[in-house]
Image: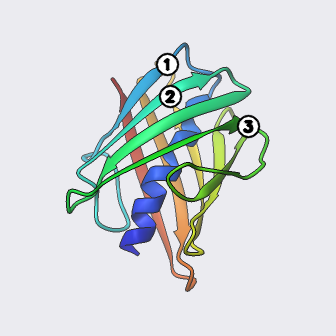
Amino acid sequence: MRKLMTAAMLLLPIAAFAADGPLTGPSTWTWNAKESKTAGEAPKSNVLKVTKDDGTNLAWSMTSVDAKGKTRKMSWSGAYDGKERPAKGGGAAAFTKGNDGSTKVAFKEKDGSTGEETCTVSSDKKKMTCKGTMKSKDGKSADYTDVYDRS
């Protein structure tokens, strides 16, 4: 389950960047450990850099340091069209917009684990909250909430 949690921490939060409309220009987001509720071992840090979000297309990169100090980098780019695309650094994800202004993402990892998440950005665009469920390849599921602060 720890590996699954790490995968989710990397793939899922990026869905929120188009929530409630595109953000203006590039942005950097830092994981808020105090406000987040993980289903496994929490990372030391997660920093997400959005390089493009025009409401139709998204491009981002993320650097995560796990509890043991191992760094993992990922990046993804594509449209909000629900089509699965690979993430450089592992896994794949598909992004869509909800009717309520949220962004939804479905993901899967190479090991067969999957997940779904819904993310929203606060009205002042300074906080992002992502709530989701992960399933390991053996069917175990875990719920989580990730909170990010815009820096």
CB atoms at circles 1 and 3 under 8 Å apart?
no
Residue positioned 51% across, 81% down in the render: 140
Q: Nearer the viewer, residue 36 or 106?
A: 106
Give the alpha-carbon distance from disc 1 to disc 3, as whole Å. Answer: 17 Å
Mark 2 falls on what kind of element?
Answer: strand
20, above or below 87, in the image? above
Say which residue label 2 marks: 50
Residue 95 visible to the viewer = yes
User: Few, some or many C-alpha atoms within 10 Å of disc 1 (few <14, some 14-19, many ≥20)?
Assistant: few
Residue 73 in percent (x, y) is at: 41, 47
Quadrant housing residue 55: top right
CB atoms at circles 1 and 2 under 8 Å apart?
yes
Label 1 amino acid? Answer: Pro
Mark 3 falls on what kind of element?
Answer: loop
Give the alpha-carbon distance from disc 3 to disc 2, as whole Å. Answer: 14 Å
Q: Which mark is residue 26?
A: 1
Q: Locate the N terminus and report the quarter of the image it occupies.
A: bottom left
Label 2 amino acid? Answer: Val
CB atoms at circles 3 and 2 under 8 Å apart?
no
Q: Which mark is residue 84?
A: none
